[in-house]
Image: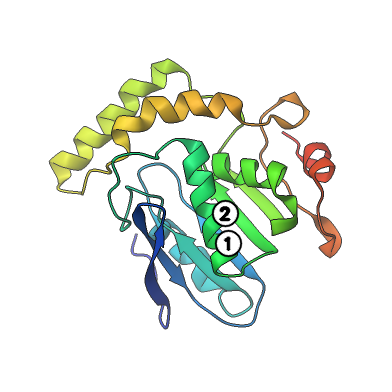
Amino acid sequence: MTMPRIPDTRRSYLRVRDVDLYCEDTGGEGEPILFLHGFFFDGRMYEAQIAALRDRYRCLTLDFRGQGRSGHARTGFQLEQLTADVLTVIRRLDLAPAHLVGLSMGGFVGMRIGAREPDLLRSLTLLNTGATPHPPVRYPLHLALTAVAGFSGRRRPSCCAASRRNSTANRSAPTPAGRPSVRCGAGGGRRPTGRHWRTRCSA
């Protein structure tokens, strides 16, 4: 299926720590939505959603370090560093409070931000993600995906070697109500608090 192209979108690289992170920004006066992609993808996975929302919201995508169109880095692929990267982008672009949408690995990052820096978020939407670590049995699947990518000619993400570290680091993620979360949101335009995220998250 061909995704719609997004016209009039600002494309730029933001230097964060030791790497250039690729960012797309539709601009506009609407409330900002920051979309975070899943492992082995990039911001282009949200093109259809952005096309539908850009008239009402300022839509941004960010490619995680070593993935998509962002630069390579030798270190820093643990979820803690990915979270720090996103926090830097939110503050540097003055997005707070922002709507944050995270799929899979992007959701891992979103949960950390929601629990630790709730004042930066207007809402948090989690897609196909969870607060529990990936089991070691999933590691061969991650490696197989990189092999398929290499065979197909797609650039291999430099973060693949850190897949095991990412999964281990995910054990430190807060687990709202002791179970994985599918969607968390701050309703009614209220500024969320740390307790708000812990009590509103539900499976």
Position of 47 relative to 67 (above/below):
below
Q: Which mark is residue 15?
A: none
Query: x, y (%) of residue 120?
Result: 69, 58
Which element carries disc 1, helix, strand or loop? helix
The foreground one among 71 and 152 is 71
Q: Is residue 199 left or right of residue 115?
A: right
Q: Residue type at mark 2: give it.
A: Leu
Position of 168 relative to 161 (above/below):
above
Q: Are marks 2 and 1 in contact (CB under 8 Å)?
A: yes
Q: Is residue 162 left or right of residue 190?
A: left
Position of 180 relative to 104 (above/below):
above
Query: x, y (%) of residue 24?
Result: 43, 69
- Name the residue located 16 percent from the left edge and 45 percent from the top edge: 152
- Name the residue located 68 percent from the left edge and 36 percent from the top edge: 181
- State the residue position of label 2: 87
Q: Is residue 105 left or right of residue 176?
A: left
Q: Residue type at mark 1: give it.
A: Ile
- Name the residue located 82 percent from the left edge and 57 percent from the top edge: 187
Q: Work out which quarter of the rendered image holds the C terminus and state it.
A: top right
- State the residue position of label 1: 90
Query: x, y (%) of residue 51?
Result: 50, 72
Which element carries disc 2, helix, strand or loop? helix
Say whether residue 184 is visible.
yes
How crowded pointer 2 is (Cα within 10 Å; few <14, some 14-19, many 20+) is rated as some
**Mark 2 to mark 1 CA distance (whole Å):** 5 Å
Q: Residue furthest top?
A: 137
Say whether residue 122 is visible.
no
- Name the residue located 85 percent from the left edge and 60 percent from the top edge: 190
